[in-house]
Amino acid sequence: MEKFFKVRVSADKQGQRLDKFLANHFEKDFSRAFLQKLFKKGKVLLNGEIPKHHQKVNVGETVEITVPEPEESVIRPEKIRLNIVYEDEHLLVVNKPQGMVTHPAPGNYTGTLVNALLAHCDDLSGIGGVSKPGIVHRLDKGTSGLLLVAKTDDAHKKLAKQFKDKTTKRVYLALVEGNVELDNGIVELPIGRSARDRKKMAVKFDDESSREAITRYKVIKRFGSFTLLECRLGTGRTHQIRVHLSYIGHPILGDEKYGTKGKFKMPMLHAATIGFTHPATKKFMEFSSKPPKEMSDAIKRGKL
């Protein structure tokens, strides 16, 4: 059955954007993406009327949201081989291959990591919704590497909070075009949806829709025509590393969306290390994986 929530705006929330106000108030219950869907469906009311998501709220105003009954999942389990690095009753760490979509979406309803996970175990968290069971964070289709999956709602909430609080450790390896000059660098540029192509993200200044994005990089080795970088995320925006590196003139090799495809089939970007505090044991855990063969071979050869 539908659930109804009513919230009154307090004085300390005066002037906040409505979407941010709700995201903060319901951070333990609903994801930002889920709340955005409620806006689009007209399930959010401000003083009894349908508002804009970016509208500012004032003290004393009333916000009501209606959460529809969960849709029946149509995502089917598929027996797809998984490279599971770690698993217990609370979570899994999976090494996702290049070319695999993380969760079902328009155009990709089969062959995803979620389809494989549903066949592997039936106790995934439901916070992400029917199409994203267990998914705490995601990797792009072309990005390989380590991905964290929650089995219980409690584990999901605690892990998601670590991502929000930036206490997780995420290290990526990237092969980029050109000879990166600085040994270390920080790219701190806001990212938002591209105005020219809605399927792409872009560095955008003075735009209400853009959000803070921070990427730190370190040169591991220079090969003349390309460079191997270690990248660490200060934030987790969509396509963040790809957008930032392209903006500074060193797009990732094989990244046709933000650079040129060249000889590689997919972007040479690998989520090599993930570290987090276990939601049940409270112990810090860290896992690492080697880059896929095509990327490893390029590094060994030292040439394209």
Image (cartoon, rainbow, N blue to C red):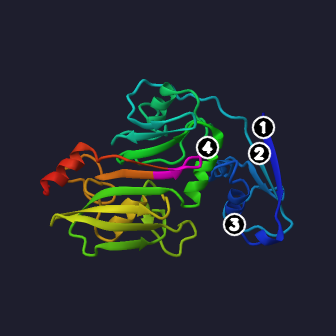
Mark 4 packing: few (<14 Cα in 10 Å), some, or many (20+)?
few
Helix, strand or loop at mark 2:
strand
Question: Is residue 241 part of the magenta span, yes or no?
Answer: no
Q: Which mark is residue 66?
A: 2
Q: Do the numbered discs 3 and 2 sit on residues whose CB atoms are within 8 Å?
A: no
- Does residue 222 appear in the picture of this structure? yes
Helix, strand or loop at mark 4:
loop
Q: Earlier in the sequence, mark 4 or mark 2?
A: 2
Q: Earlier in the sequence, mark 1 or mark 3?
A: 1
The residue at the point 30 percent across, 47 percent down is 290
Q: Which mark is residue 17?
A: 3
- The CA span between labels 4 and 2 is 32 Å
Q: Do the numbered discs 1 and 2 sit on residues whose CB atoms are within 8 Å?
A: yes
Q: Mark 4 highlights which residue? A: 280
- The CA span between labels 1 and 2 is 7 Å
Helix, strand or loop at mark 3:
loop
Q: Nearer the viewer, mark 1 or mark 4?
A: 4
Q: What is the three-letter code of the residue carrying label 2?
A: Thr
Q: Quadrant of residue 182?
A: bottom left
Q: Earlier in the sequence, mark 3 or mark 2?
A: 3
Q: What is the three-letter code of the residue carrying label 4?
A: Ala
Q: Mark 1 highlights which residue? A: 2
Q: Earlier in the sequence, mark 1 or mark 2?
A: 1
In the image, taking residue 91 as reference, residue 11 lies left or right, namely right
Q: Quadrant of the C terminus?
A: bottom left
- The CA span between labels 3 and 4 is 35 Å
The residue at the point 61 percent across, 39 percent down is 129
Image coordinates for residue 45, horizontal then vertical, percent: 78, 54
